[in-house]
Each structure stands twice: as C-alpha cells, then as structure tokens.
Image (cartoon, helix red, strand yellow):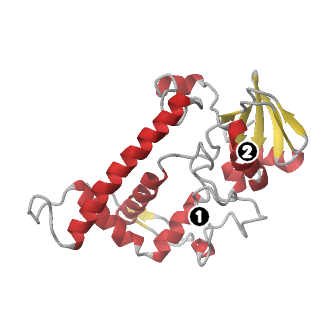
Amino acid sequence: MSDLPHRSLRNLSKKYGPIMHLRLGNISTIVVSSSEMAKEIMKTQDLHFVDRPQILSASIIFYDCTDIGFSSYGDYWRNMRKAHSKVNEILDKIINDHRDNLAKGKKYNGESENEDFVDALLMESEEFGQIKTLKQSYLNIKAHPPAPLLLPRECREETKINRYTIPVKTQVMVNAWSIGRDPKYWHNSKSFIPERFENSSINFRGNHFEFIPFGAGRRMCPDVLVCVHLFYCYIKFCLLLFSFCPQTHYLLFRVTS
C-alpha cells in the first residue's frame, strides 16, 4: 500500500475484481471499486451497512463519535438526523426571506451600502449559478473527489454479496475515486472535460452510483447543499486570485490582500 491508498486499491481491483477482502492490521475490510458494488452496499443492502466503525482518530476529533457523521446507527443517530432536518428548514426559511428581500431591493435594516454575509453569499451564488461553464467545471471536479475514499461503513448483520459472505463488524470502504475514473462510464476520464455533463441527467445526490462524491443512502453526507453553495465561492476566489493559462505555458498568479 502506497502513500496514495486509493490508487493502490484501484490497481488491486483491476487484478482481483470490484469487491476485495483485505486485512488492514487486525481490521477485516471489504473494498468496493465499482458502481454496481457501491449500489449494493449503499442502496440494495443499505440497512446491513448503515453503521460506522469506531475509529480512534474519529473518536478524538468528533467527541467520541457523537456527531452525525460518525455516530452509530440507532435512536441517537435518528434523533440527530431529525434535528439536522429541522435546522435545515430554519436555514431555508432564512435564506428564502433574504432572497425575497433581495428580489424587492430591500434589506431588513433599510441600509443599502453595507451588505451582510448572507445577502452577499446569495448574490454571488446566483451570479455564478447562471454560468454554465462554471457548473460544468464544478461537476467535473466533483467527479474526482478530494476525499477519494468515502467514510467507512460497518456491517451490522451477516449478509452475502456476489456469493461472498460478509461477517458482522466487517469494515467497508468505497473507493469513489476509482469509480469516478471507471472507463466503463467515463470517456477519457483523466481529462478535464466539463462538456461531458451537458444535457446529462447525472447528479451527485446519490441516485447515480457512477458519480458519488457525497456517498449515497442513509449515511450520505448530510451537508451536500452547503458544499454545493460554498464550492461556487471557492471557484470564484480562484478566478479572482489566479491567472490561468494553457498547459504549455507557466501558471501565472497573484495574491491580493
């Protein structure tokens, strides 16, 4: 295993198939590297693989795994999901109120020279949301996720996949990076081709398993919408701070305060 495990696992999957069993130290691990197997894990048998393994680093960072991402499946996690949904409803109402006031040219405090953060973010999001190329670039970048291995899952009940028995407590890792570069679904997958998403029905909401940067099923990333809106801002900052040129030239950039 190299310092780029997603690449090593992709190479192993070419030899041993889209579902492999590895022993990572003393942890029995299943590695999934195809959209078909990912669908089996995250949709068809989602309830069997809805748990999270108790990882030491996650316990330290996420308050003994009590957050919504790493907590074990059960009543506590379901209550967290309900609370998360209610918070989303509140935030949606706040954002919609701001949108209505922006459309009418109004502000809550009656001032026009100072924009608050939500107003500014909404205006930027709407401005860049109208740029087709930016949307294509965003989708193309998400096809190659910055977190190439999705958060691990854990088998809750013994089950079978492709005639293989998966015991309880087996850790399951989905190699989203490998799936996003599968030539079966992506033509010339190593190239930056935003146009590939033109007139395409593929989305990142967990319905198309060849494109799962946020995962899918019950344990899909709960902050998908936040990531979507913030990503436009990140691209905007890159466009503001850097000057891009063809690959045959040097990359010129400037940093402003």
Residue ID at (46%, 40%):
82
Q: Quadrant of the C terminus?
A: bottom left
Q: Residue at x 59, y 64 (%)?
A: 203
Within 10 Å of disc 2 (Cα), the crowding (few <14, some 14-19, many 20+) is: many
Q: Report the residue at 63% width, 43% height from top.
A: 150
Cα gap from disc 1 to disc 2, whole angstroms: 19 Å
Instruction: Decide: few, some or many residues near mark 1? Use Cα within 10 Å; few <14, some 14-19, many ≥20.
Output: some
Residue tagged 1:
203
**Which is nearer the N-term, disc 1 or disc 2?**
2
Is there a contact, CB below 8 Å, between mark 1 and mark 2? no
> Left or right of 62: which side holds 197?
right
Relative to 125, 176 lies left or right: right
Which residue occupies 78% across, 54% down? 36
Q: Indicate which disc residue 41 carries.
A: 2
Circle 1 SS class: loop
Residue 243 lies, with reference to residue 118, above or below; the image says below
Q: Relative to 243, does residue 75 appear above or below in the rendering?
A: above
Q: Residue furthest right?
A: 163
- Determine the image quadrant of residue 53: top right
* Residue 29 place in picture, x, y as percent: 76, 32
> How many callouts does the rendering have?
2
Residue 57, percent from left and from top: 55, 25
Mark 1 belongs to which amino acid?
A: Asn
Apparent side of residue 6 relative to residue 100 in the rendered image (left or right): right
Q: Which mark is on residue 233?
A: none
The secondary structure type at the circle numbered 2 is helix
